Image (cartoon, grey):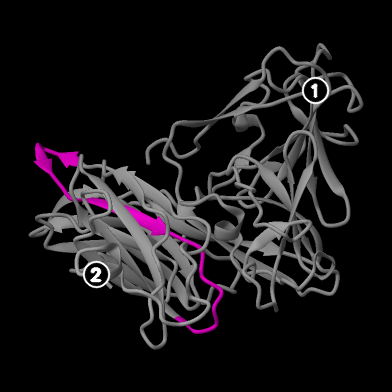
Amino acid sequence: MTQNGRDARLGSWKKQGWHRSCIGRTIQFVLLSLLIAGQSLAGGLVVVWDANTEPDVAGYKIYYGTAPSTYTQVIDVGNKTSHLIDNLQEGVTYYLVVTAYDQTGNESLPCAELSAMVTSAEIYVERIPNGIELNWSALDGATSYAVYASNIPDFTPVSPVAQVTTPGYTDVLDLKSLPLARFYLVQALANGVVMHTFDRVGAYNVGLQPGRNLISLPLLPINPDITRVLGTQLTGATNATQSDKVLYWNGRDYEVAWLVEGTSSTMEGKWVTQAGNQVSAIQVDPDRSFWLLLKPDAQNTVLTITGKVSTSPYRELTLAQGPNFIGTCYPVSVTLKNSELAADGVAIGAKSSSAADKIMRWLGDKYDVAWLVGNSGTSWDGTWFNESGSGPSTMALNPGTGYILWIKGDNPSKTWTYPNPMPNL
């Protein structure tokens, strides 16, 4: 090894099989900035990567600095595949690489260098085996952090569940219990005075049953990659036939992904394409729904989704003639009337179910259908009816549930402006 080259800084492998130059497949930056009352506060960087498949991986290290190929800081994050780097400076570009090391300390070559400019403080939530873990940027001047929690997303913070001096908190929970909706608000305090409030984050349980499940994400994921969203919570196998599957409608056809489990391959623990020879490129849109196909002999199970609570005043979706797989990223129910599907003109009503645009919700063995009444010359125009036409539908857009909006014609309005039911967040 040289004393001033990269090998000296990062170490070199002495063990056969550990010479790969990249850690997994994906490293994602989430960079934002913060400026309050003229005071520049430190920013945060969330780094996420895929796990290595060697059986004796002991952990990972992140090397970073403010110049290309020059890493003045190193963090040993242990055996996990995400980390929030805090105390980064707003407006500064950081360069980083990730390495893996084994149980005897041998270290891999670094992955390809990535860089990004820090523009704000950040908070990150993820599922862990015994609950939910929060990490956030440490802010200059903050003497403590108050953590608030509730089962409703738009709660008013009153009494914190914890007050900590370090930028992290673990909420020990039984994630398999239903129903579970847990939302968090973290405030940075300077001697008891609130100096910054982080974005609201949460965890939401979606119940699944054997066979087909049409679901959507009730929160905004920090990384939309299908492997990061679902992880290994479902049942994988060594082949596509025996594994749980994802069917994701791309507007023309279904993209298929399945979970690899029980192998010693580099694909272990990842959602892969139907052929199984590459990691699935599916990126889960929180405004869209998708199918989860559980094996027929599977038990009822729970899928925990983590992410941020949407604070934008509306979500904008472009719809097309034919089937549109839609979801609701809001973690509260929205009535069809308040969804503004009809008001925006993206759904057109008719005198009968056969001619009207309709919404379908999968119940496990059949569809619940609502259709829009229009051009009837009655007070029911603009109302969503049940399939038989005997009265108004009770269907609502519920968090975690997926829907199919079937547009019969080439409607002139194709943009759905879906309002946030929690406008004051």
**Figure quadrant of the N terminus:** bottom left
Look at the image and tell me in which quarter the C terminus lies: top left
Q: Give the range drawn in magenta.
A: 35-57
Query: Taking 337 as reference, is 376 left or right?
Result: right
SS of the residue at dot 2? Answer: loop
The verdict on residue 271 being magenta is: no
Determine the image quadrant of residue 81: bottom left
Give the residue type at disc 2.
Thr
Query: Where is 213 relative to 2, above or below?
Result: above
Q: Quadrant of residue 385?
A: top right
Measure the C-alpha gap from mark 1 to mark 2.
76 Å
Does residue 159 show up?
A: no
* Residue farthest toward the front in the current orientation of the protein: 2
Q: Residue at x 50, y 84 (%)?
A: 56
Q: In this view, does 410 lie to the left or right of 304?
A: right
Q: Which mark is residue 2?
A: 2
- In percent of width and height, residue 302 lies at 64, 68
Q: Does the magenta stretch include residue 41?
A: yes
The residue depicted at 19 percent of the width and 43 percent of the height is 90
Query: To which residue does mark 1 refer?
Result: 373
Neighbourhood count class around disc 1 (C-alpha, 10 Å): few under 14, some 14–19, many 20 upward:
many
Is disc 1 placed on a helix, strand or loop? loop
